[in-house]
């Protein structure tokens, strides 16, 4: 490819000699600076298009920077270079060159280097390029959106989708990123500038060994994971023993805590850059390759955020803990239309009610090529003016169209190869299986039959991820699809497959524990409707109905009772209904009840929760009894504490029951961070908003460590995890149990000793495991009967007596117990026996208290 060269000279007056436009800029150096410009870097001159696509974004090469950006429908793209990132006047404006026959736009500028701030502006069919255009004008404007869905606007400076850092959030005091009435408001000064950086972090010697072990199979086995989901700030924002609170470094400082608890993989809620109003949870990514700098310590070093993230990964790996990132590819932080949440009564104090109906934020993708990146729909009888919304947030991505499909794979590889991340959890992952050909088809069978043609299959078949044994975990649903049990295994590597959040495990075990009428043989009636015999018994044995028919394994079922999205475990046994209105967790609903971010009606209404205080009289708000609390805008944050201490002890018993079912079922357990200390959100089951970023929503370490009940619960969870790890051959098998070819024998055991099955029509059952190879035995006795003790009169016979490892009953966690055992340590769980090694039982059976679980072994 013959390259055209242009020479740009920037003097102290800002004049560019050549055919460029100049907009000021001077760094105090009076000598002219010469920049050689050509369509592509010399090292890339002979690249094929596919090779060039491996270098998207701004790349340091040949003593300069090579820019590559994708746009199918743009007619002109310029890169704006800034010496002063706060200036609205770029030092240089340089047009990119569209490579013939492609949608790749490129430019190489020699002399640029680390620390260069830049952004893109683009013109297209709806806003024609005119050399007379000046920022802040409407020269060339035709429409905000045309019939093809183009939304180009050169007034809006755009973030590079592949940037490794942005210099700050959008500054709303300097501009407005919206279309509509704000179309001619320039954001050249207000926008977040992309920054060219290069990390110089030096990984530890341990990290070299960690990577080798991940690749050669000597690290954590696929079935050993115990996941711990946590918010990257909330985890340590109030941690007393952490110096860098609320940061990546703070997470690293807490690695010893996670190790001691028994966690093998920490799952971080989204850490990629989001807009300033991108919510506390952060499911609004705007720069997929850039770690959120608000989670890093302040520093003047450009690469400090990346390096601090790497230090965190390094430190967690030193403690034998994997790093799993929650990634969001179903939508972006550009969001939908601004007026999507306007409510009655009309609030003249809310500025959003005066927005143009079709106003939409232009940060990056929308301005580079709205049609190429987003799924478009008709709006007000105008073709391609709206957005397909199967995500609930207004702007669904075309995950299987060329640019974003490639970005997903490139982004995952970046986090694996450069940042040493071990795996990913995909938010609303079923969107990744939506095809371009038929995005509106929500038939689960259609999704299942076509997923092999999508990026979902690309991911699990990619050799980079296979080499590193990267974990992939799907949240297998969205508003339009329920794809649980349908994510594929690899077509090129045996035993390598997608895992999934098992929402059926969550829902069915919540019913089993919290509802008196649900028995072990209770069958799920919720889709996928072609999956039959999905009983609670099947769920406890790894959900083979969901994952066994396509060659996957029990460990591909990520079991959980609670997650960030919903009640905490404490609140699950405390509240009959959600409380998402005014509270200290969600103060915006107190101050601005009609603000779009109050969102008091959000959150699931079907929680299968229960107030184990037994009567509503114990929980009040504004002097009113539940459930009327949900009809008022204010309520007492102390609601949920039982007046009767016996009922509080019962609640703790039910929490232990949930933990026992989670940790002693087959599959890969995930714990919601803080549940081990009975963390509460005061009944809020959707604490996602910016206003929820406060001390009442963070981990309250000081409160917990001074509360003996909380400390004992932590010790129970820690000990139960330790016990689980001793019996992985039973609880985390690599294949589903088959009576005729398994070295582990399993039986369902009725209380009277008779044989039964997983369709047992009662709430009391035994699960008996025996290893033919090691001789180990494990017996899990479950009694969820409402009032009756249940005697297991005939335990499996053997040469040795059974040992009691765990009993969830409340007695061992009450004042009465400690009064009778005055020397007992009140900070230690006495629901665990023999420090997890067990307490020998006499011959005969064992009687369980109502609503309890006992684990025996020998």
Image (cartoon, rainbow, N blue to C red):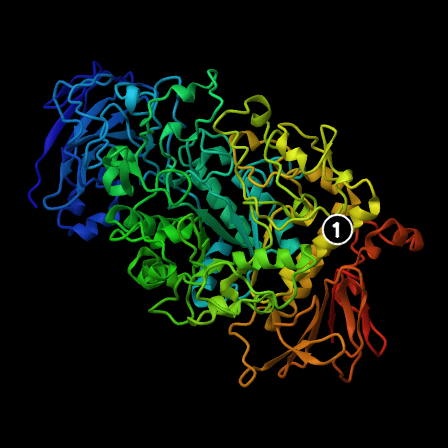
- Residue toward you, 293 or 308: 293
Q: Position of residue 616 (x, y in %)?
A: 74, 41
Task: Please give left or right for residue 591 compared with residue 104 in the image.
Answer: right
SS state under label 1: helix
Q: Position of residue 782 (x, y in %)?
A: 71, 66
Task: Please give left or right for residue 505 compared with residue 291 in the image.
Answer: right
- Give the residue at x 28% y 30%: 119
| Quarter of the view holding residue 39 | top left
Q: Position of residue 508 (x, y in %)?
A: 59, 59
Q: Position of residue 491 (x, y in %)?
A: 33, 68
Q: Residue furthest top?
A: 13
- Residue toward you, 274 or 17: 274
The residue pinned by badge 1 equals 652
- Give the residue at x 50% y 58%: 526
- Give the residue at x 73% y 51%: 713
On-image quarter of the C terminus: bottom right
Please determine whether, in this image, residue 223 is positioned above or below residue 756.
above
Asked whether the viewer can see residue 779, the reply is yes
* Picture mark count: 1
Please determine whether, in this image, residue 514 is positioned above or below residue 296.
below
- Residue toward you, 11 or 752: 752
Asked whether the viewer can see residue 63, the reply is no
| Quarter of the view holding residue 120 | top left
Q: Residue furthest left?
A: 2
| Quarter of the view holding residue 618 | top right
Please determine whether, in this image, residue 72 is positioned above or below residue 659.
above
């Amino acid at each position: 490819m013959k390259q055209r060269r242009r020479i740009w000279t920037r003097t102290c007056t800002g004049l560019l000699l050549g055919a460029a436009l100049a907009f000021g800029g001077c760094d105090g150096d009076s000598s002219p600076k010469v920049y050689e410009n050509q369509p592509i870097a010399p090292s890339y001159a002979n690249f094929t298009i596919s090779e060039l696509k491996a270098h998207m974004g701004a790349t340091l090469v040949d003593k300069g920077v090579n820019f590559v950006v994708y746009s199918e429908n743009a007619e002109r793209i310029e890169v704006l270079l800034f010496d002063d990132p706060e200036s609205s006047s770029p030092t240089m404006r340089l047009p990119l060159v569209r490579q013939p026959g492609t949608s790749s736009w490129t430019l190489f500028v020699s002399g640029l280097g680390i620390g260069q701030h830049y952004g893109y502006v683009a013109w297209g069919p709806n806003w024609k390029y005119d050399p007379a255009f000046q920022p802040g004008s409407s020269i060339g404007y035709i429409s905000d959106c045309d019939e093809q869905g183009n939304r180009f606007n050169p007034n809006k400076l755009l973030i590079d989708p592949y940037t490794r850092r942005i210099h700050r959030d959008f500054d709303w005091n300097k501009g407005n990123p919206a279309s509509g009435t704000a179309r001619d408001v320039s954001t050249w000064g207000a926008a977040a500038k992309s920054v060219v950086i290069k990390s110089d972090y030096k990984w530890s010697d341990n990290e070299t060994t960690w990577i080798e072990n991940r690749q050669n199979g000597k690290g954590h086995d696929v079935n050993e994971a115990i996941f711990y989901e946590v918010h990257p700030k909330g985890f340590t924002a109030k941690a007393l023993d952490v110096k860098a609170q609320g940061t990546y470094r703070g997470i690293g400082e807490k690695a010893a805590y996670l190790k001691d608890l028994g966690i093998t993989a920490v799952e971080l809620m989204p850490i990629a850059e989001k807009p300033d109003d991108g919510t506390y949870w952060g499911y609004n990514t705007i720069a997929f390759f850039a770690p959120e700098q608000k989670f890093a310590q302040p520093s003047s070093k450009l690469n400090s955020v990346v390096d601090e993230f790497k230090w965190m990964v390094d430190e967690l790996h030193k403690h034998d803990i994997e790093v799993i990132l929650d990634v969001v590819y179903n939508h972006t932080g550009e969001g939908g239309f601004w007026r999507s949440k306007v409510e009655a009564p009309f609030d003249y104090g809310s500025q959003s009610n005066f927005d143009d109906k079709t106003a939409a934020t232009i940060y990056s993708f929308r301005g580079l090529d709205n049609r190429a990146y987003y799924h478009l729909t008709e709006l007000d009888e105008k073709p391609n003016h709206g957005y397909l919304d199967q995500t609930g947030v207004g702007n669904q991505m075309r995950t299987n169209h060329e640019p974003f499909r490639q970005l997903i794979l490139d982004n995952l590889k970046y986090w694996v190869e450069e940042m040493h991340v071990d795996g990913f959890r995909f938010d609303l992952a079923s969107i990744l299986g939506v095809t371009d050909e038929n995005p509106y088809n929500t038939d689960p069978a259609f999704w299942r039959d076509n997923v092999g043609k999508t990026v979902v299959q690309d991911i699990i078949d990619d050799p980079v991820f296979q080499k590193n044994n990267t974990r992939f975990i799907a949240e297998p649903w969205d508003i339009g699809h329920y794809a649980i049990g349908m994510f594929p295994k690899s077509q090129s590597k045996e035993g390598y497959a997608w895992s999934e959040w098992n929402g059926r495990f969550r829902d069915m075990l919540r019913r089993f524990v919290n509802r008196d009428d649900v028995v072990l043989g209770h069958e799920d009636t919720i889709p996928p409707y072609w999956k039959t015999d999905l009983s609670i018994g099947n769920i406890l044995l790894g959900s083979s109905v969901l994952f066994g028919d396509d060659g996957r394994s029990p460990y591909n079922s990520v079991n959980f009772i609670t997650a960030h999205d919903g009640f905490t475990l404490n609140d699950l046994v405390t509240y009959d209904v959600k409380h998402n209105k005014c509270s200290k967790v969600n103060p915006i609903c107190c101050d601005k009840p009609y603000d779009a971010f109050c969102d008091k009606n959000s959150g699931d209404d079907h929680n299968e929760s229960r107030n184990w205080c037994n009567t509503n009289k114990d929980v009040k708000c504004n002097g009113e009894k539940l459930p009327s609390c949900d009809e008022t805008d204010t309520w007492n944050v102390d609601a949920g504490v039982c007046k009767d201490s016996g009922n509080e002890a019962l609640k703790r018993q039910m929490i232990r029951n949930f933990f026992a079912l989670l940790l002693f079922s087959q599959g890969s357990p995930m714990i919601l961070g803080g549940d081990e200390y009975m963390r509460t959100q005061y009944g809020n089951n959707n604490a996602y908003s910016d206003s929820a970023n406060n001390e009442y929503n963070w981990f309250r370490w000081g409160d917990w460590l001074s509360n003996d009940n909380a400390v004992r619960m932590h010790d129970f969870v820690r000990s139960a995890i330790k016990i689980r790890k001793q019996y992985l051959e039973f609880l985390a098998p690599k294949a589903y149990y088959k009576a005729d070819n398994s070295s582990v024998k399993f039986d369902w055991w009725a209380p009277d000793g008779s044989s039964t099955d997983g369709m047992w029509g009662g709430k009391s059952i035994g699960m008996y495991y025996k290893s033919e190879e090691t001789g180990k035995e494990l017996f899990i006795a479950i009694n969820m009967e409402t009032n009756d003790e249940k005697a297991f009169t005939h335990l499996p016979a053997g040469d040795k007596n059974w040992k009691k490892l765990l009993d969830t009953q409340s007695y061992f966690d009450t004042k009465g117990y400690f009064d009778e055992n005055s020397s007992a340590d009140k900070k230690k769980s006495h629901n665990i026996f023999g420090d997890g090694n067990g307490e020998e039982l006499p011959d005969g059976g064992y009687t369980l208290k109502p609503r309890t679980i006992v684990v025996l072994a020998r």
